[in-house]
Image: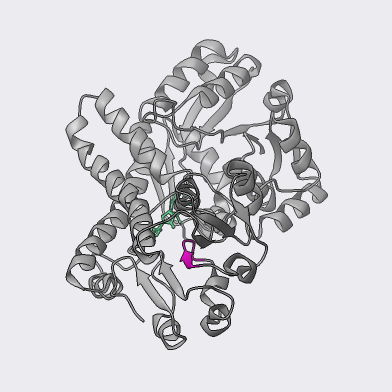
């Protein structure tokens, strides 16, 4: 079986390299010439642990190639995975489906034999059925071109592991043939015990947005508890530990802090609400508006605490921001709480110096007005306040005594609630947390 992967961004590049590593011949279709030529040279245009090595290995083995030619892709593939993006629409709510529809429309005229077109992008429920209709009417092979929906749940930072050893596989299919083909693609994870859920299109589409909405809800729930902790003197980390021991709740995704960002959770909950409204069930997802609002409040809360820590006035102050990526082990700055907080402080007249182990190049591109430093020490030199906003492991291993020697004021806001507060207090720091009592 030969496989094509259409769209080699984050999801597609990972999927293509992982399928090649499982032994398939894979052709990646990428229309951006710079991205394609980087991938052809085995160079990954973004940061993702373990993926660069895998990409080089698969390109060198000859199992993985890239093209921009849909005719070539159609001739090559028995199964086509559609992995293009579904960004937020300009209205800030629904998903922009032009890339998904464009990819399918470009492929369709060349599909002259039985093929399976598998959607992996996160889409509004109802999309798979529409794509099936487009293919049925525009592909020369007509009815013999089938759509399947196979949502992707990979997390940035764990993309390779999540693809090769997924928690579960969801297969939205219309026929046994489609199911059999997908079971063949995923034979290895299935043999390893990965649960397979075979279902219809709308359920498969909804699983993805439901999962992301649940995760966003869990994070905003604990962040709402952090607001309560702040006014009562309670500790949200202890609270999360205590409720997390209940197996029905679970401790994961209960870390309070600056909230969620990235290319998925914020846009997915907005697009899901927009779709519910179109479907006439607006009220069912009204709570997601509140989840979004709680999340946005986190960023404002940090600015408010920073102002208080800096004596009520921001202009002319010097602040070090540790972290620019939306989460550690990623160079993704999309909707990053850390970077938004840094930019807001700058707008308010603060001299902000940002550090991040991986995300400085994209951050500099988006926010050239900010200053950037290559080391933690350089970022913190002379700072009146340090903000810890992305929980990279190396920030946790900083020695508070050594850091205290370079700053102007030993004041820290721990926006991720994971620093060793006692060690900072012992070193003479005052640490403000989000939902925990202040130390020092
Ligand atoms: C998410 C989903 O986890 C993944 O299944 C889906 O395929 C894509 O969207 P990702 O965006 O890579 O993955 O990041 P994730 O690890 O889910 O974190 C999302 C955001 O939530 C980050 O900003 C992170 O810092 C934040 N977060 C996570 C918290 O604030 N607290 C937590 O307890 C967990």
Total marks placed: 0
Rendering quarter of residue 126: top left
Depth order, front residue of 246/91: 91
Please determine whether, in this image, residue 217 is positioned above or below residue 287.
below
Residue 359 appears anywhere in the view: no
Q: Is residue 272 visible?
A: yes
Classify residue 221 as left or right of residue 399: left
Q: Nearer the viewer, residue 22 or 66?
A: 66
Magenta stretch in the rendered image: 384-391
Quarter of the image where the C terminus is located: bottom left
Q: Which quarter of the image is occupied by the N terminus?
A: top right
Q: Nearer the viewer, residue 160 or 283?
A: 283
Write the residue at 34% across / 47% down.
296
Colouring chosen for the image of the structure? one colour
Task: Tell me which image quadrant ligand 1 sits in.
Answer: bottom left
Q: Position of residue 150 (x, y in %)?
A: 47, 40
The vertical placement of 417 against 10, above or below, is below
Q: Residue at the location (38% across, 30% down)?
A: 124
Question: Residue sitting at 71 percent across and 29 percent down?
Answer: 76
| Magenta highlight on residue 274 | no
Relative to 398, is 326 above or below? above
Task: Tell me residue 144's x, y (percent).
Answer: 54, 20
**Residue appearing at x 44%, y 57% in the figure:** 167
Which residue is nearer to you in this view: 98 or 131?
Answer: 98
- Spot occupied by residue 158 in the image (x, y as percentages of width and height): 55, 58
């Amino acid at each position: 079986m030969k496989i094509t992967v259409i769209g080699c961004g984050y999801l597609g590049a990972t999927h293509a390299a992982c399928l090649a590593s499982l032994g398939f011949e894979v052709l990646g279709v990428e229309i951006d010439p710079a991205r394609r030529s980087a991938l052809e040279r085995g160079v990954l245009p973004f940061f993702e642990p373990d993926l660069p090595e895998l990409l080089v290995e698969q390109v060198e083995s000859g199992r993985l190639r890239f093209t921009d030619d849909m005719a070539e892709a159609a001739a090559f593939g028995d199964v086509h995975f559609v992995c293009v993006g579904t960004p937020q629409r300009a209205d800030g709510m629904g998903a922009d489906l032009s890339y998904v529809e464009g990819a399918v429309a470009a492929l369709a005229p060349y599909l002259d034999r039985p093929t399976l077109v598998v959607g992996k992008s996160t889409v509004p429920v109802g999309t798979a059925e529409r794509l099936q209709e487009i293919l049925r009417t525009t592909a020369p092979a007509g009815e013999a071109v089938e759509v399947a929906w196979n949502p992707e749940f990979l997390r940035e930072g764990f993309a390779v592991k999540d693809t090769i050893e997924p928690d579960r596989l969801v297969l939205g299919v219309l026929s046994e043939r489609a199911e059999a083909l997908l079971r063949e693609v995923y034979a290895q994870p299935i043999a390893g015990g990965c649960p397979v859920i075979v279902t219809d299109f709308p359920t498969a589409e909804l699983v993805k947005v439901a999962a992301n909405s649940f995760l966003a809800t869990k994070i905003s729930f604990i962040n709402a508890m952090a607001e309560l902790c702040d006014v009562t003197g309670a500790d949200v980390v202890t609270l999360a530990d205590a409720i997390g021991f209940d197996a029905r709740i679970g401790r994961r995704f209960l870390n309070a802090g600056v909230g969620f960002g990235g290319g998925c959770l914020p846009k997915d909950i907005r697009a899901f609400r927009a779709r519910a409204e179109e479907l006439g069930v607006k009220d069912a997802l009204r709570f997601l508006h509140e989840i979004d609002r709680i999340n946005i409040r986190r960023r404002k809360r940090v600015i408010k605490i920073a102002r208080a820590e800096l004596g009520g006035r921001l202009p002319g102050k010097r602040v070090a921001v540790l972290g620019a990526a939306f989460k550690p082990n990623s160079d993704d700055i999309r909707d990053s709480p850390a970077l938004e907080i840094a930019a807001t402080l700058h707008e308010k007249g603060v001299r902000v110096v940002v550090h991040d182990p991986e995300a400085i190049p994209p951050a500099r591109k988006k926010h050239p007005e900010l200053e950037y430093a290559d080391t933690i020490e350089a970022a913190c030199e002379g700072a009146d306040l340090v903000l810890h906003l992305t929980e990279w492991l190396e920030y946790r291993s900083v020695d508070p005594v050594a850091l205290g020697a370079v700053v102007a004021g030993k004041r820290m806001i721990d926006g991720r609630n994971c620093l060793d507060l006692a060690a900072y207090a012992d070193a003479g720091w005052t640490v403000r947390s989000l939902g925990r009592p202040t130390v020092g």
